[in-house]
Image (cartoon, rainbow, N blue to C red):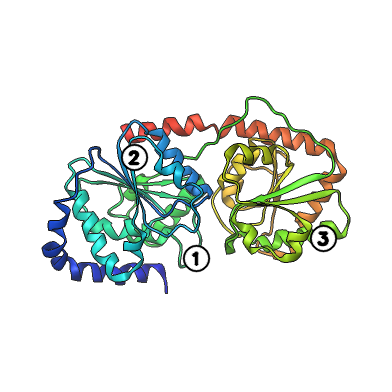
């Protein structure tokens, strides 16, 4: 079922139950203590991931402001839970049990909408939470409603359709890269949304901490790393095929896998690669980036992933598919290696293997691309720029 259809059907249920909620649910909100600030955050979950790290960074931008934070989906690990729950001036709550069940969800939507409406200067900020979109029609116009969108999926079930269905209610639609912002405006055009709503679409790119000096040792064997999860869009099975070809040709390379992806790797891969699992400590992850030479990603779609920025900050050369989001910052043979014709999976495997072979044979080129990747990251991905933009946004 198309996401737009799901949104419309559930909204009918919400409006049908609104009178009942007004009678039986609203009185309970009067007993809930008001937020002593004006900020409410609705995030999907606190599992480890690039999006969740961005959410943490946003909270750190405004650690002096009191905020209530709600997680609306079940988290299959708690790697970042302490990071969220230990934030100063924050009250975090996991409400996924009230969101997963259809009947509970209907009345929970009304409960939180009623509660938020009790606050005169409320600002609700959300990312990856469908629960947030369900609340939108029931919140007062005076409530500032902000969506953060991490990518554009090009399918029928993408998060971008929740935003499309609610474009009138959203005061701000923040994108993490310019490619996603362009896609939203194209989507608006396709669905004949008035041009005035384009002005609500903005871009604030996430930042990362970057070492002051370049400190990469280039020598064989080259280390190729994949870090992250293993969802369908990532096509990690293509990386496994590239690894098989590299090993078959006896190239001087090591493949490393970190993150939740390890649970989806083939046994053959686990026997031939270095498996790190989920790395909770940032310093340990940074050390892994520093010791690696190539970051490999074969995604079919996404924006500009955080992992690329993090890896480039330590001189890793991005070897990635030439997605529009990636091309926003990456230029082939300048600061990266881009795989064109990325929809052809056989081509991705062949080209990815050839690029690794090229770097193994030409360590001078490897060193040059590594230095350029680091330099570009330092000039464009500083966390300080990100902090300032979000501080200005929330204080504006």
The reply, left or right, for residue 16 in relation to residue 54 is: left
Q: Please report whichever mark, 3 or 1, sits nearer to the chain's N-terminal start.
A: 1
Q: Please report whichever mark, 3 or 2, sits nearer to the chain's N-terminal start.
A: 2
Distance from disc 3 to disc 2, alpha carbons, whole Å, reads 49 Å
* Label 1: few (<14), some (14–19) or many (≥20) C-alpha neighbours in 10 Å: few
Point out the image quarter for the N terminus: bottom left
Which x, y percent locates residue 171? 30, 47
* Label 2: few (<14), some (14–19) or many (≥20) C-alpha neighbours in 10 Å: many
Point out the image quarter for the C terminus: top left
Please determine whether, in this image, residue 132 is positioned above or below residue 81.
Answer: below
Q: Which residue is mark 1?
A: 155
Distance from disc 3 to disc 1, alpha carbons, whole Å, reads 31 Å
- Dividing the picture into quadrants, the one containing residue 380 is top right
* Label 3: few (<14), some (14–19) or many (≥20) C-alpha neighbours in 10 Å: some
The reply, left or right, for residue 199 in relation to residue 224 is: left
Q: Which residue is mark 3?
A: 245
Identified at 71% across, 38% down, the residue is 334
Residue 39 visible in rendering: yes
The reply, left or right, for residue 333 in relation to residue 60 is: right
Q: Nearer the viewer, residue 76 or 103?
A: 76
Q: Which residue is mark 2?
A: 90
Which x, y percent locates residue 294? 73, 45
């Amino acid at each position: 079922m198309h996401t737009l259809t799901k949104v419309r059907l559930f909204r009918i249920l919400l409006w049908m139950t609104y009178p009942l909620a007004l009678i039986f649910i609203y009185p309970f909100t009067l007993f809930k203590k008001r937020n002593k600030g004006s900020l409410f955050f609705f995030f999907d979950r606190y599992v480890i991931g690039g999006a969740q790290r961005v959410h943490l960074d946003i909270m750190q931008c405004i650690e002096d402001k009191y905020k209530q934070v709600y997680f609306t989906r079940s988290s299959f690990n708690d790697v970042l839970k302490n990071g969220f729950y230990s934030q100063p001036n924050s009250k975090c709550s996991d409400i996924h049990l009230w969101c997963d069940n259809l009947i509970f969800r209907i009345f929970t939507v009304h409960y939180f909408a009623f509660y938020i409406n009790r606050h005169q200067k409320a600002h609700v900020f959300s990312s990856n939470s469908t629960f947030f979109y369900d609340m939108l029609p029931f919140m007062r116009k005076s409530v500032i409603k902000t969506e953060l969108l991490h990518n554009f999926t090009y399918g029928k079930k993408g998060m971008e359709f929740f935003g499309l269905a609610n474009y009138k209610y959203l005061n701000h639609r923040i994108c993490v890269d310019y490619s996603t912002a362009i896609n939203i405006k194209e989507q608006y055009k396709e669905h004949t949304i008035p041009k005035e709503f384009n002005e609500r679409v903005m871009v604030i790119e996430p930042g990362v901490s970057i070492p002051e000096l370049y400190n990469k040792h280039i020598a064989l064997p080259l280390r190729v790393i994949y870090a992250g999860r293993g969802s369908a869009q990532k096509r990690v099975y293509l990386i496994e095929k590239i690894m098989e070809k590299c090993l078959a040709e006896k190239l001087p390379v090591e493949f490393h896998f970190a993150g939740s992806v390890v649970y989806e790797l083939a046994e053959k891969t686990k026997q031939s690669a270095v498996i790190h699992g989920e790395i909770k400590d940032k310093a340990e992850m940074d050390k892994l980036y520093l010791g690696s030479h190539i970051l490999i990603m074969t995604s079919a779609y996404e924006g500009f992933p955080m992992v690329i920025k993090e890896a480039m900050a330590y001189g890793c050369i991005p070897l990635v598919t030439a997605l529009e989001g990636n091309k926003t910052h990456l230029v082939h043979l300048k600061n990266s290696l881009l795989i064109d014709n990325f929809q052809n999976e056989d081509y991705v495997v062949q080209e990815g293997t050839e690029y690794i072979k090229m770097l193994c044979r030409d360590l001078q080129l490897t060193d040059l691309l590594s230095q350029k990747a680091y330099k570009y990251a330092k000039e464009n991905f500083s966390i300080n720029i990100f902090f300032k933009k979000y501080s200005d946004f929330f204080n504006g």
